[in-house]
Image (cartoon, helix red, strand yellow):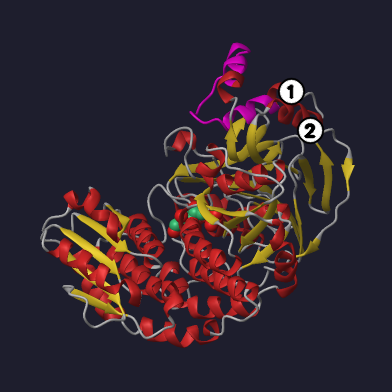
Amino acid sequence: MCGIIAYTGKRQAAGILYEGLTRLEYRGYDSAGIALSGGQRICCVKRAGRVSAIADALTMPGNCGIGHTRWATHGGAEDKNAHPHVCGKFAVVHNGIIENYMRLKAELADMGHVFSSDTDSETAAHLLEAYYRGDLLEAVQKTVRELEGSFALCLLCADYPDRVVCVRQKSPLIVGAGADGMLAASDIPALGACKKIRVLSDGEIALLSPEGAEFFDFSLSSLPAAFTDNAVRSVAVEKGRYAHFMRKEIGEEGRAVRDTARAFDGREGARLAADAGLFSRIYIAACGTAYHSALTGASLLEEALRVPVTAETAGEFCCRRPLLGRDTLVLAVSQSGETADTLAAGRLAKKRGARLAVLTNAGYSTLARLADYRFLTYAGVEVGVAATKTYAAQLAFFYALAAFLRGGRAAFLEKFPAVHKKLLREEGRIRRLAADVASARGVYFIGRGADYPSALEGSLKLREVSYLPGAGYAAGELKHGSIALLDETAVVVAVVTQKRLKEKSKNAVCEVRSRGAKVIAVTPFSDVPADAVLPLPPCPQRYYPLASEVPLQLLAYHTALARGLDPDRPRNLAKSVTVE
Ligand code: M6R
C-alpha cells in the first residue's frame, strides 16, 4: 500500500530509485514519482500510471533522492496526487494515512499555504516547510508530533543536499547499508544488494548520509544503529521464462510446500504444545487469502487440540469485541506481516492479555516482531498481487503444525511436489476452459466441509484477476437464496474432494445444472455429473485443499489472460494492505 524508497551515496540516485520502485510496484501502481536534491534545489518527476511512466526521471542527475509508487487512498489516481509532494525546500514521500490531515490542512491554509493535491500526505511537506528554521531534525520532530495516524516518510531538504530523513510510525520502513551508499525502503526486495539492514520501529527517525545513518526517537535522543545481516538479499525477483509472476509463483508451490514443511520450527512448536493446555479457545485472525488458509487451519487445529478454534477476518475480529484473556491464543496469519487489520488484531490480543502466535512469510515484519510464538512459511518472495504460493505454504504449515501437535509428521507434504507436477500437466485443459469462463456473466464456486475454504479462495482469485462478478458459497447454502443468481449465463465451479460428502455435493451440482448454469467440477472422482472436469490426482483426503487450489489458481490466471488483463497488476489492488 504505497511503496517508498530513498538513496544517498556515491552513485547516480535516479537509476537506483527507479529500479527499487519497480520492486515495490506490487504495493500500488496508481502513480509514481522521484525527487532528487542537489545544488540547493529539488527536481521532481511524477505522474499517474506505473513506474514506467516516469522513465524520463532516469536522466535527472544527483546522488540523493526519494521515490514513491502509490495506491490511492485520499485523492484519485491523477498526476497532481502523485508523490513526492514538494513544498518550498522540502520533498516528501509517504506511506500510510495521516488521519488528522483535514484539520492540519485548514490550519496551514489559514497561514497562507496553497495545496496542489487532494492527498493527506501533502500536509507533511507543508508542515516541514512551516516549522523549518534552518535545523532539519527540529523541523522533522515538530512535524511528526503533529501527525496522527500511520506514516512512513522519506524526505529531502534542499539545504541538506546529501541527507535523507526517514520516519516510521505504524507503516513499515527499513534502512539498508550498501557498499556505496545508504538506502531506505518499505520492503526488503527494494534494498537490492544491501548486506546490512535495520528495521525501523514505530517512533524512530533515521538520518541517512552517504557515509552511514544515525537513529533517533521522536524526542531526538540517539538510538543504537544495530544493523543486522540482510537474509533476503540474494533472492531473485525475476519472472524468468514466465510471462507473469502469478504463473511463475503457481509453479513454485511444490517447493514452497516442501520447504515450509521441512523448516517447520519444532522448538517453537514444542513451546506452543507445552502451553496448549492453558488455552480454552483459539482464534485465527487473517485477511483475504490468508483468512481462507486460516479456515482450513482452524479445522486442523481444532481436531488436533480438541479446543474450539475459530477463523475470523482480522478487520471484523477487532470490530466485534471477541472474548480475549489469558486463556486465549490468537494466531495471526499474514504473508507480508504488515497488513494493518491483522496487525490490529495482534495488538488487540496482546493488549487484552492473550498470547499471540504469528505465521508470516516475512520474518522481519512488524507482525513477526509482536509474536510470542513465531512461525514462518518458506514460500520465498511473492511478487504477484494474487497470493498463490504463500497460500500453499500457509496450508502446509497448518498441516505440519497439526501433525506435530498430534505427535506425528505430515509426511504427505514431502510428496506434494510430485502431485503438484501432475496438476500442472492439466494446464492445457484449464486454458481451454478459461476461454468459456471468460465470457460468463457470473462465476460461482461451491464446496462442502474441507472444500468450502477452497471454493472461497478459488472465487477470490478469479474475481481479483479477471474482474468477473461471483462469489464462493458453502454448497449447502446456495439453495437458501443465492441460487437465484443462476441461469445459462453463469458458470459454477464445484470443488468435490471429500468422499464422505460426495453424494451431497453431487446433489448440489445437479441443482445448479437444472437452473441452466454450466458446472466445472474440480474433483478426483469420476462420477460427478458436471459439464467439464478438472481432475485431481489421488491424495490423502485431508490434503485435497492443497491439491484443488492449483487448478483453481490456473483457472483464474488463464481467465484473466483470456480477458486481456494483466494478472500481476489487478486494478485497484495492492499486495500489502497497510491501512485499516
Ligand atoms: O499479507 P497478507 O497475507 O496479510 O495479505 C492479506 C490479503 O490482503 C491478501 O491475502 C489478499 O487477499 C491477496 N492478495 C489475494 O490474492
Is residue 113 visible in the rendered image? The answer is no
Of residue 296 and residue 245, the one placed in the foreground of this image is 296
Q: Is residue 261 left or right of residue 370?
A: left
Q: Residues within 10 Å of mark 1 (few under 14, many from 20)?
A: some
Q: Amino acid at mark 2?
A: Leu
Residue in view at x 77 percent, y 41 percent: 205
Residue that sits furthest to the top in the current view: 110
Q: Amino acid at mark 1?
A: Tyr
Residue in view at x 62 percent, y 75 percent: 406
Query: Residue 101: percent from the left, percent from the top?
Result: 58, 25
Query: Which element type, helix, strand or loop, lies under badge 2?
Result: helix
Numbered mark located on residue 437 in the image: none
For the record, the magenta segment spans 105-128
> How far apart are the alpha carbons under marks 2 and 1?
9 Å
Which mark sits nearer the N-terminus, 2 or 1? Answer: 1
Q: Which residue is mark 1?
A: 131
Q: Is residue 532 left or right of residue 160?
A: left
- Quarter that holds the C terminus: top right
Q: Which residue is mark 2?
A: 136
**Label 2 lies in ligand 1 vicinity (Cβ under 8 Å):** no
Of residue 569 and residue 137, the one placed in the foreground of this image is 569
Q: Where, by quadrant of the figure, is residue 85 drawn?
A: top right
Question: Circles 2 and 1: CB distance less than 8 Å?
Answer: no
Is residue 363 visible in the rendered image? The answer is yes
Query: Which element type, helix, strand or loop, lies under badge 1?
Result: helix
124 magenta-colored: yes
**Label 1 lies in ligand 1 vicinity (Cβ under 8 Å):** no
Q: How many marks?
A: 2
Q: Residues within 10 Å of mark 2 (few under 14, many from 20)?
A: some
Of residue 531 and residue 93, the one placed in the foreground of this image is 531
